[in-house]
Image (cartoon, rainbow, N blue to C red):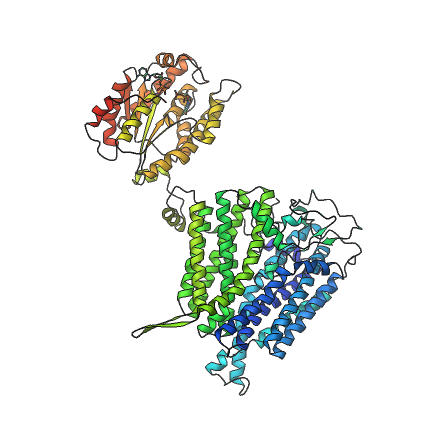
Amino acid sequence: MSRSAPLGAPGEARGVLSSKPFRRMWTALSLSSLGDWLGLLALLALAAALTADADPMTRAYAVAGAAAVKLAPPVLLSPLAGVLADRFDRRLTMVVADAVRALLYLSIPLAGRLDWLLIAGFLAEIAALAWSPAKDAALAELVPQRRLGQATRLAVLTSYATAPVAGVLFAALASLSWLVGALLPGGGGPAGSAEAFLAPRTDAALYAAAAAYMAAALTALALPKPRRSAGEAAPAAAPPAAPGAAAEDERTTPLAPAVPSSDDEATAELQTTEGGAAPAADDRTAPLATGAGATERTAQFAPAPQDGGGTARTAEQRPEAPEEAVPRYRPENLLRTLWQGGRFAGTTPLVRGLLAGMVSVFPAVAAVAGVARLHVVSLGAGNAGFGVLFAAVFAGMALGMLAGPRILHHLSRPRLFAVSMGAAAVALLAAGLIPNTVMAAVLVALAGGAAGITWVTGITLVHQELEEDIRTRTLGYLNAVARAELLVAVVGAPLLAAVIGDYALGYGDLSYGFLGSGAVLLIAGLLVLAAALATYRRIDGGEVPLSRELLAALRGVPLPTADVQQEEGRLPGTFIVLEGGEGAGKSTQAGRLSVWLREEGFEVVTTREPGSTKLGMRLRAMLLDREGTEMSARAEALLYAADRAEHVASVILPALRRGAIVISDRYVDSNLAYQGAGRDLARDDIERVNEWATEDLSPHLTVLLDIPPEQGLARLGGATDRMESETEEFHARVRQSFRELAGRDPARYLVVDARESAEELTREIQRRLRPVLPDPVPTDAEAITGMMPTIKE
Ligand SMILES: Nc1ncnc2c1ncn2[C@@H]1O[C@H](COP(=O)(O)OP(=O)(O)O)[C@@H](O)[C@H]1O
Ligand SMILES: Cc1cn([C@H]2C[C@H](O)[C@@H](COP(=O)(O)OP(=O)(O)O)O2)c(=O)[nH]c1=O
């Protein structure tokens, strides 16, 4: 997977926009997208306005119907795009499709009827089905291959960026037409009255949408003539992606114009395959307007038919399409992707959690857009309020996506994912409960922002977690599910609001208007909250409590290291280390002590170095195998330290955080003694490396089992591993070093003569251990211990 520049990076935008034909194309696409968004807003608003006098259920049907005509065709009729795609000249197709849409939108306010609104809206979407693949192919022809990836990214960004612009424009037009109505007596309703404010004022927006489409058509008309006419020969405008692998990650996904790289630092970015043969993400498509079909519209020209389920190939691997080859447009089959995708998706709990999270955030945000029109009416706001609400949710989402990779830097990404879901849920709940337009706008912006963070973080994690092949399918599946959900949510939300209905709740002088539309937001919030909790449980592997990590992240500081936590008394466990030479009896004592401590009711974790983790086992084999493991002293020191780092992070610290007693057979002192004194490395260096590796976590007590090396080795029946096979002098230096270390800090050490009996040694250690333990140990415990069998490890 190639790494591309951040989406919309200024340098990148300048790069592609310096090409005049692309600038023109980009202008046409922007205008078309603006028309799309304005059209959606106006259709929803007009549908509500035309049924203002009808009962709430009829009004809900009208709004849902308007949403359905905008959203359903791309999802359900995508095969049609394949039929239309290669028939006509692409530039001309774009021009005609835009002009047709302009005329249709113009006709809607002139007719002023709901049935025509639905029919014209639907026909406009059929025109869009022809427009989209034509645009993809035209883009591929206009922009040099190496720039195509950038051009596509910029186009996609623009298509989403026009959503909030359209929202604001819609609000402005609604206010303006009210003002005009107010200033011109008889210009529409009682001048300046509240009714005038609430009256349907969507005509202006429909005219504006028509104007945007017409301007797009005219701009497209000025595009340079295609080098080849369609149907003759055409370049491989888009990679021959296998349909089964539909919606590769480089393509746009409905709520996510951007698929970031796995690099956390990278801004949300779209990745295209190297060489720029970008699969022409659907930049015309707006996510909720028509963008539910973003991917179907993506042209997929294949030199030869491939069957489903194949892996998308990279540009390098892709065979050049022969000049004569007639490209075949292959629309994505949504149902097939849904059916097949499920089999690949969700390989690990983390990925399953991520997918579950992402698919629950989509419909929630879509529901906001779906219900917004009814909600503002219930709140007593007009079209201006609708535009603001709409702009707020999409502007929030765009900001969330851009900020996501940078936000709360010190919070782990899986946690950020779950936390942002939780935040979206809370914002939705609040938006549902507070019947106020301004608050609603602020809250849905927050919900959109949080959902944007969720999405971008989820995609980043999917990139990190999955191999390219499975990732492609997983993202394709996600895309398909999201689109199906969007359709259901946007269309279903207003219906659900009407079914629930509005109620006035009163208690004494207090009254509260409970709105059906608010209830939909409430339900969406509750669902996301439940999903956030379930996702959190599934994906969280963090040992630090979330609240603490979150607080640290909010303050912008890294989590306190283990030693700081230890000093601050925030590591409730007790850490005991047994040190000494070979055969000193460390494992024997570790076993006996753990039996005693468990009897006392403590949770005990007995562990050892090296080799107590998966990684550690491999390191241990490298370090102790006698065959073929020549290594420098520094490498040896670092490998032991690496084993320790993993040991601390994955075994010792988690146990100490739980409040357990950890007994480790060897720790940092072995490194200092064996590599420092034994191998003659500078002690300071080893200390520094270990401080870093262990977050400076030090034991509460170290028991040194001191024994002359030859006696210890004799107990083992002779040397078996690489270290034990070292010279006598080596082992003598090691012993000396252990004694010195203990001498430096007597308060933290207990030195015992390991030649004594195992029972006697246990008693000595118990005596010393008692004051270190969290709770007082009953004095008769010692007697009991005497009767205990020794645990053989
Ligand atoms: N105090 C002791 N006196 C005599 N033998 C012992 C004593 N402690 C342990 N042993 C024996 O010495 C051998 C090595 O003990 P072990 O606990 O494995 O040492 P280490 O873990 O330090 O290498 C084992 O056979 C064990 O039974
Ligand atoms: C932890 C550690 C162990 N070692 C050596 C000491 C041992 O010879 C060997 C660990 O082997 P192991 O079989 O665990 O020895 P023991 O039973 O005596 O604990 O690794 C180091 O050299 N540096 C270190 O930091």
Q: Quadrant of residue 440?
A: bottom left
Q: How many marks?
A: 0
Name the quadrant of the C terminus. top left
- Residue 94 horizontal/vertical position (percent): 71, 64
Residue at 64% from the left image edge and 48% from the top image edge:
244
Observer able to see residue 251: no
Ligand 1 quadrant assignment: top left
- Residue 120 horizontal/vertical position (percent): 64, 72
Q: Quadrant of residue 124?
A: bottom right
- Residue 337 horizontal/vertical position (percent): 61, 51
Between 297 and 455, which is closer to the camera in this rendering? 297
Name the quadrant of the N terminus. top right
Residue pushed farthest bottom? 185
Observer able to see residue 635: yes
Between 509 and 412, which is closer to the camera in this rendering? 509
Residue 687 against residue 510 in the figure, above or below: above
Give left or right: position of 667 versus 105: left
Residue at 69% from the left image edge and 52% from the top image edge:
238
- Residue 523 horizontal/vertical position (percent): 44, 61
